[in-house]
Image: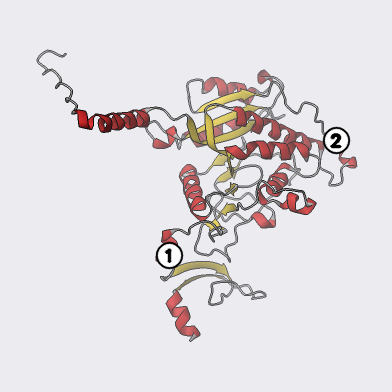
Amino acid sequence: LLAGASPPPPPLALVDSNQAAVVAVQAATAAALTPRATVWLRIVMPCHSRTTGVNYLRATLAAILLQLPPGDPLRALVDVLVVNTDAHPADNKAYADVRAELAGEPLVRFAQLDSRRYASLKPRNAATVMRRVKASVQQQTIDLAEIFAVADAALPRAELVMAAEDDWLLCPNGLLAILHLVRTASALDPHWIALRCSYGFNGIVLRAADLPSLVEHLAAHFVRRPPDHLVFEWFSGEWHAKQKLPGSANAAGRSYRTYRHNLFYHIGHISTLSQPSNRFTPRCYELLYDWLLPAETFKRDECPASDVWPCTPAPAAPSELAVGLFEPFSRVDFAMGLRDREGHVPAGAPDKARVLELTSRERRAGSAR
């Protein structure tokens, strides 16, 4: 005790009849203060050396850590797993340098692909592959299968996993946007299989429980398509349906959802897919429509007032209360061209300048009568 300080009050005497209730409260309090056995979101980030020696990893991790300052509640929910795909850590100078710089940062963990589960898989000559997937792209897919196998085994366990690349910067307030995306998508479909908020094999939120299925699909089909196409056919059920495979796909009865806004900015200039160097680079929070397969893009004509597509609830999912509250009132529609009374752009309508349309269902119903 400090000099002059009063002694602490004695503990309250427990009445026998309340003993069980008090013990239960104490146990619940202790459980709430105990660190969780799982993390909510694990960002999984492959890292490989580049011939130019440029270090993208430092800036990419800095963009994430800036959104997880000391005292921020998200620090208890999010961590990052960086996996080096070079044969030896020292061969990847960017990885080695950043690992040393962040040695005291508990939210960033580093792993090395030492023992490979799919060591027998080798890229094939592109001339012998129907879709002519380059050997370097095939190797990238094999590496991704290995990386997500490592992520699946990582402790503590994660509830969600987000694929990220080491040359894409998380946009300002990106983690809050991802939290909003997950909450909105979960209200529409509690059993969603994937959420997309950026391009390529980046900004894809998955459930950790689904990783074994994804790893198996990537390893089995690395010669057919690039990895971002393979992950789409996996979470959409496209491959399973085309091949008429027995049983049900992992995606059966589960939706995938796309965020309206791009949450990552690409700073890399060299791609394994041989994209042109002058290709348009989507900026932060721009509409998610470029660089994706048609079935992945955000459809603003279908969901003009929502930031998640599809914006309709899954058949078995209860719709959000907010939808029922705000549907009768006005909504803001952004679109190119004219709209019908239901808010859709009619087929073949001539393109016009972007318009801001503020209407209400009552007004539409009145004009229809």
- Give coordinates of residue 18: x percent, y percent: 22, 32
Residue plotted at (41% across, 33% down) = 69
- Give coordinates of residue 36: x percent, y percent: 44, 30
Q: Are marks 2 and 1 in contact (CB under 8 Å)?
A: no
Is residue 7 visible in the rendered image? The answer is: yes
Mark 2: which secondary structure? loop
* Left or right: 362 in relation to 219: left
Check disc 2 and report the residue beneath it: 124
Label 1: few (<14), some (14–19) or many (≥20) C-alpha neighbours in 10 Å:
few
Mark 1: which secondary structure? helix
Determine the CA span between mark 2 and mark 1: 54 Å
Residue plotted at (52% across, 44% down) = 171
Coloring applied to the structure: secondary structure
Residue plotted at (72% across, 45% down) = 230
The quadrant of the rendering that contains the N terminus is top left
* Label 2 vs label 1, nearer the camera: 1
Q: Is residue 4 above or below residue 211?
A: above
Point out which mark residue 249 bears: none
At label 2, the amino acid type is Arg
Instruction: Name the quadrant containing residue 203.
Output: top right
State the residue in front, 79 or 239. Answer: 239
Residue plotted at (15% across, 21% down) = 10
- Give coordinates of residue 278: x percent, y percent: 69, 48
Q: Residue furthest front?
A: 17
At label 1, the amino acid type is Gly
Check disc 1 and report the residue beneath it: 324
